[in-house]
Image (cartoon, grey):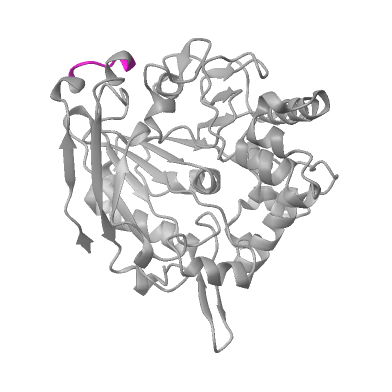
């Protein structure tokens, strides 16, 4: 196993002395963490799309957090056919050969108490994403000319097995998290994660921008369902989906959707999502195929440019998200939590500006970091649902 040099540049030691986001606004810490390759992964058949070794970045906890662990799945979309997977295999999304060897840890991964008050001193791990199926596939494609490894499930297992002797196996508290496709991975692996840990470990899971809806687009097609069906079939995902879910539902690919899988997850879960998630807006609700003449182009770039009909469609999307979440969560229970804001964004936990800063988005005067911490530590019932757009003036509308 190879652990590259850990490079930490601290611009202000004073930032560690306070948990106030107002202090964090002007005093910032940049933490760059080196990559660790899982050297024995090939013996487990745990390989990236191109056959390279999987990897993670680990920054050690300290003080009272030494026995606590946070694992964060990296996101980055999916590949659903041989062509797209071959293309992906030649990029950082399908090969550790092309990945940056250092990753900046910010937001939920920060080691600064003023920027990440509840998890700053935990062992924090970023799992690099190189399989194209949210760490869930188990198969291979070999036609004699091209070779692809669909081994996301094995990558997940190999990384956990590598971390267990490094302290994960003695964890007192653990949080499995992820963003986007990595947020989906949190749903898919949440209960499995608990099986690796001591029975007295407090284990919970969080998904950031991973609550992808099984929703019809504006032309009444279901592009996300078609995409997920192709991923599940191509990469051998079905065998790794929740058995209770696949038994209950006739179409196994539906269990790749969090709205169907969530009700079967037994581990406490927190959903962090924008009600107007930009990825789902642009690729699920109004994909290019459903808007060939570009009537939605201005609306996609600027929500203020949406006409009354377009705004109504967006509000219906928000309504459907909230209804499905309320179906899965008990309203007055501290077991599960949610933070559903009305910002046009995608992934908010790893960005310092949206996680915990002077002008971070809030719902009911609570930042995302505060909401997640209140839920994890059982301080309060945390089911924060924002008012509908455009009422929230704290939003960072992060539209690409």
Left/right of residue 12 with respect to residue 370 in the rendered view: left
Q: Residue at x 66, y 46 (%)?
A: 257
Q: Residue at x 54, y 58 (%)?
A: 136
Region in magenta: 17-21
- Snapshot quadrant of residue 19: top left
Between 312 and 295, the one lying in front of the other is 295
- Snapshot quadrant of residue 46: bottom left
Left/right of residue 69 with respect to residue 286 in the rendered view: left
Please identify the quadrant where the N terminus is shown.
Answer: bottom left
- Snapshot quadrant of residue 112: top left
Mark yes or no: residue 121 visible. Answer: no
> Magenta part mainly helix, strand or loop?
loop
Q: Is residue 82 above or below residue 282?
A: below
Between 67 and 63, the one lying in front of the other is 63
Task: Return the x and y of residue 226 as percentages of the image width and height.
Answer: 74, 56
Q: Is residue 74 above or below residue 349?
A: below
| Residue reaching furthest to the bottom | 144
Between 75 and 399, the one lying in front of the other is 399
Left/right of residue 239 with respect to residue 284 in the rendered view: left
Task: Give yes or no for residue 20 being in the magenta stretch.
Answer: yes
Please identify the quadrant where the C terminus is shown.
Answer: top right
Task: Return the x and y of residue 331 as percentages of the image width and height.
Answer: 62, 18
| Residue reaching furthest to the top | 365
| Residue reaching furthest to the left | 13
Task: Return the x and y of residue 26 as percentages of the image width and height.
Answer: 27, 20
Q: Residue at x 27, y 48 (%)?
A: 58
């Amino acid at each position: 196993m190879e652990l590259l040099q850990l490079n930490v540049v601290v611009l202000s030691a004073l930032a560690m002395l306070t948990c106030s986001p107002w202090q964090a606004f002007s005093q910032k810490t940049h933490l760059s963490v080196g990559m660790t390759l899982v050297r024995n992964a090939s013996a487990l058949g745990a390989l990236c799309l191109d056959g390279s070794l999987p990897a993670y970045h680990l920054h050690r906890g300290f003080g009272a957090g030494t026995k606590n662990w946070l694992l964060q799945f990296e996101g980055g979309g999916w590949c659903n056919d041989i062509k797209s997977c071959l293309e992906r295999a030649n990029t950082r999304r399908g090969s550790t050969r092309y990945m940056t060897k250092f990753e900046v840890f910010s937001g939920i991964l920060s080691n600064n108490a003023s920027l990440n008050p509840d998890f700053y001193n935990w062992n924090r791990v970023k799992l690099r994403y190189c399989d194209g199926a949210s760490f869930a596939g188990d198969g291979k494609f070999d036609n004699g000319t091209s070779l692809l490894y669909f081994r996301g499930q094995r990558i997940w297992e190999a990384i956990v097995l590598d971390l267990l002797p490094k302290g994960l196996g003695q964890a007192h508290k653990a949080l499995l998290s992820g963003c986007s496709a990595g947020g989906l991975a949190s749903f898919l692996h949440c209960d499995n994660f608990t099986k690796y840990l001591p029975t007295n470990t407090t284990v919970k899971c969080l998904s950031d921008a991973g609550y992808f809806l099984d929703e019809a687009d504006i032309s009444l097609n279901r592009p996300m369902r078609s995409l997920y069906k192709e991923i599940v079939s191509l990469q051998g995902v079905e065998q790794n989906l929740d058995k209770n879910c696949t038994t209950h539902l006739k179409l196994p690919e539906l269990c790749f959707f969090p709205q169907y899988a969530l009700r079967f997850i037994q581990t406490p879960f927190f959903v962090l999502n924008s009600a107007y998630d930009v990825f789902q807006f642009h690729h699920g609700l109004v994909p290019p195929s459903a808007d060939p003449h570009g009537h939605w182009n201005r609306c996609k770039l600027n929500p203020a440019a949406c006409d009354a009909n377009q705004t109504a469609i967006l509000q219906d999307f928000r309504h459907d998200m909230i209804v499905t979440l309320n179906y899965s969560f008990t309203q007055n229970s501290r077991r599960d939590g949610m933070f559903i804001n009305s910002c046009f964004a995608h992934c908010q936990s790893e960005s310092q500006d949206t996680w915990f800063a002077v002008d971070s988005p809030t719902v009911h005067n609570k930042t995302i970091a505060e909401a997640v911490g209140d839920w994890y530590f059982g301080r309060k019932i945390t089911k924060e649902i924002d008012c509908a757009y455009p009422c929230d003036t704290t939003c960072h509308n992060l539209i690409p």
